Image (cartoon, rainbow, N blue to C red):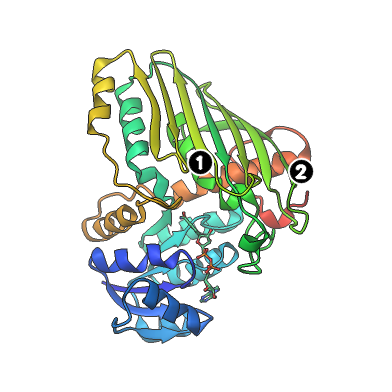
């Protein structure tokens, strides 16, 4: 299966090696900046890889006819590139956020369905060991009635981070702390508390990054359809280093706290059900020193399996839309000064201001 990577920047080393490992035939690398392709090949130890190189993705698609592309460019260009490829019958694995508007996300889902190709979204934290264990306990019913789920993302990003590329920290091409950094935590809230949401209230602010137009802090309250409540606090305002990503689930017969830097560790695992308690014995995650975690590997293996076996893809366009919708609902609530009912039919970061 012919594979091409579009966007060879910081996240690309989490893609190229796993594309090869999962058995894709990597035929092309594309970046506006040819030097980024060299850096990617060097940092991944793949300088000997025989691939064609392009700076124009349209030309690459025409000349190389890939079956699959990964889109790892800036967030503002995901939908345009993905739609171009999906419309030509190419399956797409796109980085989070899948798009910056609900309209674009819906178009991407519709075109993938029309063309009968796969649309995958890299919300890899759904496949972390800690996430999978919590999901298993939830599916067993071990929490009893779930009361609420809280998500706290307390990270650090300073000027040097935003200066890496002009797209960062803009409404046009990125969004702020919620869209870029906290979307994984909000995605897990939706995975754990239930996909169906009735209403979202939120507030965002820029407290410590005066040179940015977007938020560096956001809080939110989520009312899920079955009564579960979600609370959220996310920020990039920590002094000097990331502190934590903490997700707490409180149920009538169980309490779980995921913590560490990126909710990959289990800090509390406490259940009435002895079989749920015993699940923890199987928890032996591979160590990681990155907030990206190790799960891009699983994203690739599952994407390949879904392409080959028609096994349903979990991290699909609907999953991507769900996380995007939750971020956009907090933004919209801030803009309108009140609760926002879901589902959202339309909204974009491009409508935002603080
Ligand atoms: N899943 C995760 O945990 C995770 C982590 C980091 C970044 N990301 C996402 O990955 C995306 C990229 O982030 P990054 O940190 O690698 O950014 P980056 O700026 O380091 O890299 C983006 C690359 O895309 C290239 N590019 C832009 N437009 C292009 C085009 N039209 N054609 C070809 N190349 C083009 C740029 O030249 C650049 O090299 C973002 O959407 C970000 O949110 C996801």
> Tag 2's secondary structure?
helix
| Residue behind mark 1 | 185
* Mark carried by residue 49: none
Residue 199 can be seen in this image: yes
- The residue carrying pointer 2 sits among few (fewer than 14), some (14 to 19) or many (20 or more) residues within 10 Å by Cα, namely some
Q: Is the residue marked 1 within 8 Å of ligand 1, measured from its CB? A: no
Q: Nearer the viewer, residue 290 or 25?
A: 290
Q: Quadrant of the N terminus?
A: bottom left
In-image side of 200 versus 297 (left or right) = right
Q: Residues within 10 Å of mark 1 (few under 14, many from 20)?
A: many
**Element class at badge 1:** helix
**217 w.r.t. 271: above or below:** below
Q: Is residue 205 left or right of residue 119?
A: right
Residue 261: x and y in percent read 47, 42
Residue 93 percent across, percent down from the top left: 40, 62
**Residue 330 locus on image (x, y percent):** 66, 40
Front position in the image: 11 or 288: 288
The CA span between labels 1 and 2 is 22 Å
Vertical position of residue 98 compared to residue 192: above or below: below
The structure residue drawn at horizontal position 77% and vertical position 52%, both measured from the top left corner, is 353
Please give the name of the residue rendered at 31% of the width and 56% of the height, measured from the top-left corner. Answer: 297
Residue position marked by numbered label 2 in the rendering: 335
User: Going 45% across and 85% down the picture, which residue do you hit?
Assistant: 54
Residue 173 visible? The answer is: no
Q: Mark 2 or mark 1, which is nearer the start of the sequence?
A: 1
């Amino acid at each position: 299966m012919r594979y091409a990577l579009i966007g060879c920047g910081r996240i690309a080393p989490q893609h190229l090696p796993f594309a090869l490992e999962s058995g894709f035939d990597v035929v092309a690398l594309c970046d506006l900046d040819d030097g980024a392709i060299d850096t990617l090949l060097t940092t991944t130890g793949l300088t000997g890889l025989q691939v064609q190189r392009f700076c124009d993705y349209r030309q690459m698609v025409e000349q190389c006819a890939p079956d699959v592309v990964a889109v790892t460019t800036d967030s503002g260009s995901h939908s345009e590139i993905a739609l171009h490829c999906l419309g030509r019958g190419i399956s797409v694995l796109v980085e989070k956020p899948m798009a910056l508007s609900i309209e674009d996300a819906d178009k991407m889902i519709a075109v993938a369905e029309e063309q009968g190709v796969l649309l995958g979204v890299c919300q890899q934290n759904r496949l972390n060991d800690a996430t999978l264990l919590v999901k298993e306990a939830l599916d067993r019913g071990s929490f009893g009635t779930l009361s609420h789920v809280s998500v706290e993302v307390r990270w650090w990003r300073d000027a040097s981070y935003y200066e890496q590329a002009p797209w960062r920290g803009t409404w046009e091409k990125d969004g702020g702390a919620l869209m870029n950094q906290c979307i994984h935590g909000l995605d897990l809230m939706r995975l754990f508390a239930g996909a169906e949401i009735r209403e979202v209230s939120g507030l965002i602010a820029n407290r410590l990054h005066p040179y940015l137009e977007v938020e560096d802090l956001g809080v939110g309250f989520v009312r899920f359809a079955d009564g579960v409540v979600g609370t959220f606090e996310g920020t990039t305002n920590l002094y000097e280093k990331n502190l934590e990503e903490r997700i707490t689930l409180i149920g009538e017969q169980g309490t779980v706290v995921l913590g560490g830097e990126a909710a990959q560790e289990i800090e509390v695992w406490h259940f009435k059900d002895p079989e749920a308690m015993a699940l923890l014995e199987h928890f032996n995650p591979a160590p990681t020193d990155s907030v990206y975690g190790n799960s891009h590997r699983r994203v690739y293996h599952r994407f390949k399996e879904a392409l080959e076996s028609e096994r349903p893809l979990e991290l699909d366009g609907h999953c991507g839309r769900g996380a995007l919708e939750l971020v956009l609902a907090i933004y919209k609530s801030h803009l309108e000064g009140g609760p926002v009912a879901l589902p959202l039919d339309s909204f974009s970061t491009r409508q935002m201001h603080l």
